[in-house]
Image (tube, rainbow, N blue to C red):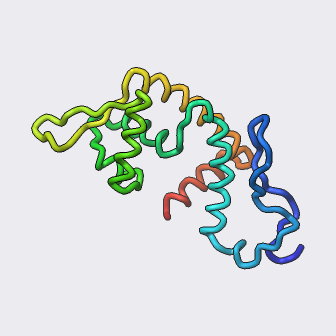
Amino acid sequence: MTRGRRTTSSVLPRPAGRGDAFEQWPEDVEFGVLRELMGYALRRAQIAIYEDFFATVADLDITPPMFSSMVLIRNNPGLSQSRLGRVVGIARSGTMALVDRLERAGYVERRPTPGDRRVNQLALTPHGEEVLDELIRRIRAHDDRVSARLSEAEKVTLRDLLARF
């Protein structure tokens, strides 16, 4: 085997009807030092995972930050918009745009914080609750699909290792 090349394809399985727009690690391409770089490997995995994510929720027009924000809002009653941005890792202006989009879709509402009119608490609407239940069902299937080549123990190890970054 040539250094830096793989002898087997590692393209993730795709949902039915998806083309292969992204080649994960094609055998006929020499990646050189890129194969040794953790950030490069993580980014290539992210691209493949995102392709499957977007195919999974295409009809709902949801992005990964929208999904994770909805989960965080549901699980953290009274979460403020600024705290959401810090937890998700989005700048203040990006957080405002994200919450605006969720609000326009009818998934989230801003509520005043008692005692502090400058801060809004975020809450899922009843429609947002229903959509999130469906999203969780789909995203669990997506997660099973993209991690199908890993054992349960490997999945736990990978999540633990990634948490160290």
Instruction: Between residue 157 and residue 10, name the one nearer to us.
Output: 10
Residue 129's place in the image compared with 47, above or below, is above
- Quadrant of the image occupied by residue 27: bottom right
Q: Position of residue 2 (x, y in %)?
A: 87, 76
Residue 129 or 164: which is nearer the viewer? 129
- Quadrant containing the N terminus in the rendered view: bottom right
Q: Is residue 81 above or below residue 105?
A: below
**Which of the 4 quarters of the picture holds residue 23?**
bottom right
Q: Quadrant of residue 86?
A: bottom left
- Can you give x and y, in whole percent of width and height, for residue 99 in the image? 37, 40
Q: Is residue 97 left or right of residue 48?
A: left
Residue 127's spot in the image, x, y percent? 43, 22
Q: Is residue 101 left or right of residue 145?
A: left
Identify which residue is drawn at 38% across, 33% down.
Answer: 103
* Drawn side of residue 12 relative to residue 38, left or right: right
Residue 161 versus residue 50 in the image, above or below: below
Residue at left offset 79%, top offset 49%: 20
Residue at 29% of width from left, 40% of height from top?
A: 79
The residue positioned 84% from the left and 57% from the top of the image is 9
Image mark count: 0
In the image, 87 versus 65, the foreground residue is 65
